[in-house]
Amino acid sequence: MKTIGCHLGVIVGMALTTWGILAWSEVHYGVSHLWPLSGSLRPHPVHLLALGLACLPPPFLVLLRHAPAQPDANDPANVQ
């Protein structure tokens, strides 16, 4: 069940990253209104991109931590 959650986390992270890149290209990669110093804060496609990239490391770390280790070919216990 933990790996399903990790895979869903990777899917969500990649989807948000892709959505952010595509939306950012629609505004011609502009950074105006990214963090306005005056006026109201509006969502910017870079915010989606950052959120998607921030979602990716935790599931990858969990999946790597629970990956089965490769047997050592030089270990006498593994000789058949």
Image (cartoon, rainbow, N blue to C red):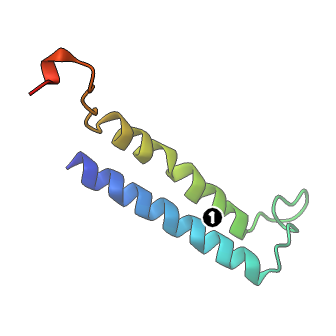
Hey, which residue is sitting farthest bottom in the picture? Answer: 26
Q: Residue at x 86, y 60 (%)?
A: 36
- Residue at the image point whose x is 43% and y is 39% from the top: 61
> Can the viewer see residue 44?
yes
Q: Secondary structure at mark 1?
A: helix
Q: Quadrant of residue 76?
A: top left
Horizontally, is 60 left or right of 23 in the view?
A: left
Residue 43 makes an appearance in the image: no
Q: Mark 1 — residue?
A: 48
For this orientation, the residue located farthest to the right is 38
Please state if 31 lies on the left or on the right of 63 as rendered. right
Horizontally, residue 39 falls left or right of residue 54, namely: right
Q: Position of residue 2 (x, y in %)?
A: 25, 46
Residue furthest out toward the top: 76
Question: Percent x, y for residue 15?
Answer: 50, 69
Quadrant (top left/top right/bottom left/bottom right) for the C terminus? top left
Q: Which residue is nearer to you in this view: 73 or 10?
A: 73
Q: Is residue 71 above or below residue 6?
A: above
Q: Amino acid at mark 1?
A: Leu
Crowd around label 1: few <14 · some 14–19 · many ≥20 (10 Å): many
Please tell me whether residue 5 is drawn above or below residue 76 in the rendered image.
Answer: below
What is the x, y in percent for residue 10?
43, 57
Residue located at (27% from left, 20% from top): 74
x, y (%) of residue 13? 50, 60
Classify residue 12 as left or right of residue 33. Answer: left
Q: Residue at x 14, y 24 (%)?
A: 79
